[in-house]
Image (cartoon, coloured by chain):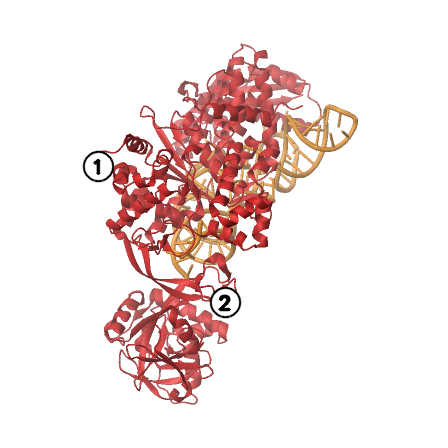
Chain colours: A red, B orange
Amino acid sequence: MPRYQPEEIEKKWRNAYEEKKLYEADADEKREKFFVTVPVMYPDGRLHTGHMYTWTRADIFARFQRMKGKNVLFPQGFHMTGGPMAGMSLRLKSGDEKAIKIMKDQGATEDDIKRFAGNPLELGLFFGKTYKSDFDLVGTSIDWRRNFILSYTEQYSKFVEWQFRTLREMGYITQGSHPVVWCPRENTSLGDHDRAEGEGESPLEFTIIKFKIDGLILPAATLRPETIYGVSNLWINEQGEYKKVRFSNGEEWIVSKEFTEKLPFQKNVAEKIEDFGISELVGKTAINPVNKEEVPILNAEFVKTDRNTGIVMSVPMHAPFDYDYYNKKKADVKLKEPLKVIDVKTNPNLMEEAIKRFGAGEKELENATKYVYKTEFNYGIMNENNGPLSGRPVKEAKEYAIELIKEKGAYDNFYETSGEVICRCGARGLIKLVENQWFIRYSDKKLKEKTIDWLQNMDVRPEEAKAQIINAVYNMEDKAATRNGGLGTPLPWDKTWLIEPLSDSTIYMAYYTFAHLIKEMKPEEISDSMFDYILLDKKPDKKFPEIVEKMKREFEYWYPLDLRVTAKELITNHIAFFIMTHVAMFNKDKWPRGLGINGWLTVNGKKMSKSKGNTMTIDYVVNNYGADSARLISSASNGMDDAAWDLNNINGFKQKIEFMLELTEVIESFSEDKRLVDEFLLSRINYLIENSEKAYNSMKYKNSLNYSFFEFIENVKDYIDYGGNNKDTLKYAITVFSKLNHPLFPFVTEEINNALNKGDLLERYRSWPEINEEYKNELVENEFEVLKQTINDINNLINIIDKDPKEIIIGIAGKEKFGIYNKIEEITHRSRDIKEIRKAVQINDFVNKLLKNPKRLPNKKLDYELEMKVFTESKSKLKEMYNAEIKIEESNEDRAFPGKPMLVIK
RNA sequence: GCAGAGGUAACGAAGCGGUCAAACGUGUAAGGCUUAGGACCUUAUGGCUUAGGCCUUCGAGGGUUCAAAUCCCUCCCUCUGCACCA
């Protein structure tokens, strides 16, 4: 029967924590606070190991901070804004078999499903309950009193309304149109997840340049308006169907039939559309609106009528397709030499080179196009043929070209998807210009600057995530903050819109500080001026009731947020929005202070995903392995790399716990003897405390585990191996061990600590072990390293002679040798110049040997007396080990070095 | 395409100028224990050696340095994000 019975231990301490309300935190001005959060979650399914990974990482930090004596708040809310919850509810309502199966697999009954189908809130509450019990099971120290649902809580909606009115007053809200990938059949925006094909494709803006012919307009679509001076002709495709479209401003455009179908999604509706025989234009000339040049209209089958207008302007010297077809056409039609308008210094004949390099097939030309565009964009200069554009780098010329075209009254624009997008429903996605959309102006330069400045001060763990976040902020564009469907808070001044989920969740962490109090208030009691008073410290316009004062005290105490823990995919959206909105709205002393970013979790080498079926629910893992074992998962990685969790690790963990429990049990059988090895262990423990603390602070839990757990146990074993048997030392060691590991494995460490030291729960007082400077003893550690090395050598030698030794003689080098050795060691730290070292000491055979290998110069202080003592004290242990006579003596033989005794094995 | 991160032994991963043939864990192997298996304990785990030694390694190729896995340059490869979608 193993000593380690996780279920029993965990139940015991789980109850103790519950009883002492360990996780419930209230403002207490006498104590330092620590506020940690993980983003809200959508309660639409059971929690699995992936969740456990992120939440345990936050929990470990929370426990670590409690042990440092801080008052820690770790709340958790749920999110129901937007599509997922409403979507699932709808799917159930429509009897979607798959959705029903998903629900049943997760423990919902027929009745539950019926309730969910009518009301997404029921769905959320159902899983919300399982979240609480799952998190409790695995020991996530959440204060559930402060739980609330975004944005299903009326009080919270008031908060969001206040937030948006405030942002608007501050000038951070604008309205405008916005291109969105759209499904014309289902008439909704087409997010990545809704696509059968074309994930990652986004709206791409094309410039339309209006070429004129006989009062008609030929709108050529291009990504490179800066090449307008190099246009040699227009291309159309005679195989395509074209239409004449009349707009209300009187303009008549010739465009492809497909274009007329996309038109309503982006431009004003055409007044009249009629068939047009495109062939009648072939051979005629149109007028380039910028330089008034006449350009011929030619047929080319490469023109795709389902892309853009079906009219293409041809710039042979800068577009491989144009170049290729232009040269072919020259055989039939008399054409001018095309004009080169961009020079690339390093490649004077870029076009020829590109065609030669890539070839002339369709695919090849596409690659050549990419190459030419990229090279010209980065290194090209507009040459003197370009009117007002001349001399400008291509990078800048585009903007100026658009201005120029606008001046001539020949500009328009049109969006296409950057690649083909197919909706799950089978329809081909296109771009819709959503009108009157509301934006948050994250593009604001000042706001970006302030945010980036602040980010420099923030504790970002791991450090390399900081660069990513700064980058994300730097590249931030305006964010569409509203949407049409789903759940959410209506935009207060334009209730046709709902505030979308990434925008109603940027400052809700502040809401946690008073979530349990505001619950008591009626929504109509809640006003903007109340939030102004609590959150922005504005002078109250009236006296507020006591509960508001209490809310303010909680907010003032807990804010700012000290740590937000999340997976890396949120960096470029949520994390950036979260920090920027704080910087925009709050006083500087309320801006967030720290972040912890982690990667994905892999289990037994495989990326976890529902579709692969390798997700394990939290209750499954805990019930099978125990909560402490399950929490090993948090140490699966140090940084943002994918975290690898190997279930095999659990076994080793349990075994080592078993060892520590056993040691704890027999602690009274150890002696009062103190020897050198006690100094060794105390020194090691100091080192381990220091390093695990560092690792915890930077959330490198893999390292924490290494120091506080594995290395710690190795050192305790070494201590015993080298003859250590002092009761106090061991008691101290086990106590420190239980404390250092408590954040990672709260239950079993509480058990161990409690068995040795009757006292309060580890997180109810400042229990984190202190570093004792006087325990640090480098010399002793070095000499025990020598012992370890020597034992290794002995083993080696025994292997070689291949017989059981009768006698082992260990010859410690003489005292003078140690003197010389240490003198050299001192120099080594500032210089490895052999000449310098030779100057400093008298040369003899011994010195020559020491200096023989410049890579192995002395670099650890050693001590003659200690070395002697280390071996003398472990003599009986060595004797036991090898079952041989052990002789420890001073040796003046050449082979005896400080730190490397001479060995004779007989 | 743009931006960011990264490539270390069978695997995960530490190290980020000298203490590095490279912590720690897992896996594997041998020995011990055991009726046996599992579990556990000990040892080994780049190559060649065999009186404690030598040689070759940290994506590839160059460079800086007395000294490079660690610093610089070039190339190759992998991962992540790119917004109205959570």
Rendered view: A467 above or below A277: above
The one nearer the camera, A559 or A206, is A559
The one nearer the camera, A682 or A421, is A421
Residue for badge 1 = A540
- In the rendered structure, the answer to whether residue A557 lies left or right of residue B84 reads left
Q: Quadrant of the N terminus of chain A?
A: top right
The one nearer the camera, A158 or A267, is A158
Q: State how many labels appear.
A: 2
Rendered view: A816 above or below A489: above
Q: Residues within 10 Å of mark 1 (few under 14, many from 20)?
A: few
How far separated are the C-alphas under marks 2 and 1?
55 Å
- Identified at 57% across, 47% down, the residue is A103
Rendered view: A245 above or below A755: below
Amino acid type, callout 1: Pro
Residue A442's x, y, as percent? 31, 52
- Identified at 66% across, 20% down, the residue is A882
Residue for badge 2 = A427
Residue A3's x, y, as percent? 62, 22
